[in-house]
Image (spheres, helix red, strand yellow):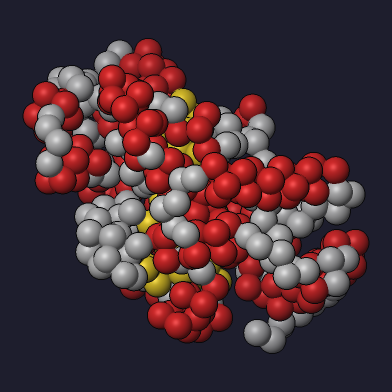
Amino acid sequence: MVLQHNDGQLDLFDIAVFDSVDSTKALRDLRSSLCERDEQANLYSEYPVHHLFDPPSKSDIHRLNQKTAQYRKKEGGLLDVKTARLEIERWKEHAQRQLRENRSENAKKVVLSLFDYTGNWSKPWREAGYNVFQFDIQSDPEVGNVFNFSPQFFADYFGDFDGLDIYAILAACPCTDFASSGSRHFAAKDLNGTTQVSIDLVHQTLATIEYFRPAMWAIENPVGRIASLTGLPPWRTSFDPNDLGDPYTKKTILWGRFNGDLPIAPVEPTEGSKMWKKYGGKSQATKNARSVTPEGFSYGFFMANNAVDQPSLEARMKYDRLDPELMSDAISNGYTAEQIGALIDDFYYIEMDDGAAEKAIRDLISSEPRQQLQL
């Protein structure tokens, strides 16, 4: 899905703002028309604007249960819960160490965490010194309402984040109307419009991602029908909490653009599928309990995707029309993504001249001694 912001054309932000929960046929047809137009533009244009929503390559798809199975085979068993918790504690200490050692670099990067009532998914990023902005309608009915998002909203409430880069957008979209565990209620929800509101939330999330074009984005949901109903690209990573130190199962899928090869701390799922056993019911409290992001996953995701440990990730994804090997070479030569941006942003974003941007990077790499770029 590609949403254009030029020529005065209407985009999903505009739709959501003027009628956020209208699930009439007219609104659905308008959204369908916009998406079809933009998808065609991106598919057939010689110069696509970005590759935010490209499907992952085969090598980019990771099933953490396979890593767990390989670990079991190699080690003759899995970790006990205590040992797994020690591994997660090391991940936590690593994030906290970045606050001490990399505060200035991380403070220049913004992480937007949507539908994040507990703050669990964004916690490692906050601990590492990133500028984290947490949104959930339960915490703030106005600012936390994703349907209110628009360019004017971000300007009025957040001053466009003072021009800082949006490094990542994380979104744990509400799963009640998508998860297979609730399939017996699908027919009624489809008829009364509840499902359409959830679809609109996902589309508004995708519009936010397209608007900011972060280096990294991810949408999380349990196994279900979210992809088939919303047009998400193919998924990138699947996991169960027991792959990352929490001894229960809840098959979860991640869509987006990120490094899906998360570290694991595999344990036996001794608690089984505990969510519906322990937290069944219709109250908001039990729904919140079922949707809490496992701590092991939160820190594992951070370990695989933070800019300090994955220095070329930001450059390759942010400038995704350029040769990824060239971007990695620039990082290997000691330049940061921020320095590269100072050199090529005009070529890349304004002139849309990818050839000139790549030439500037090659010239930079070949220059001796290494230039000191002004930011």
Position in image of residue 98 (x %, y %)? 37, 66
Locate residue 266: give its quadrant.
Answer: top left
Which residue is at 33% across, 44% downward? 174
- Residue farthest along the left direction in this orientation: 278
Instruction: Please tell me whether residue 7 is drawn above or below residue 181 in the rendered image.
Output: below
> Which image quarter is the C terminus in?
bottom right
Residue 306 visible (yes or no): no
Q: Write the residue at 22% across / 64% down.
A: 139
Residue drawn where x is 27% and y is 66% of the image = 141
- Residue 14 makes an appearance in the image: yes
Q: Please provide percent x and percent y for residue 254.
A: 45, 37
Q: In this view of the protein, which residue sits in the foreground, 79 or 315? A: 315
- 364 left or right, relative to 75: right
- Residue 204: x percent and y percent? 49, 54
Q: Residue furthest bottom?
A: 374
Q: Is residue 245 left or right of residue 22?
A: left
Residue placed most toward the observer, 318 or 44: 44
Between 168 and 68, the one lying in front of the other is: 168
Q: Write down the quadrant of residue 133 in the picture.
A: bottom left
Number of disc labels: 0
Q: Is residue 26 above or below residue 277?
A: below
Residue 256 relative to residue 238: left or right: right
x%, y% of residue 351?
85, 72
Which residue corresponds to the image point at 52% horizontal and 77% vertical from the top-left?
A: 152
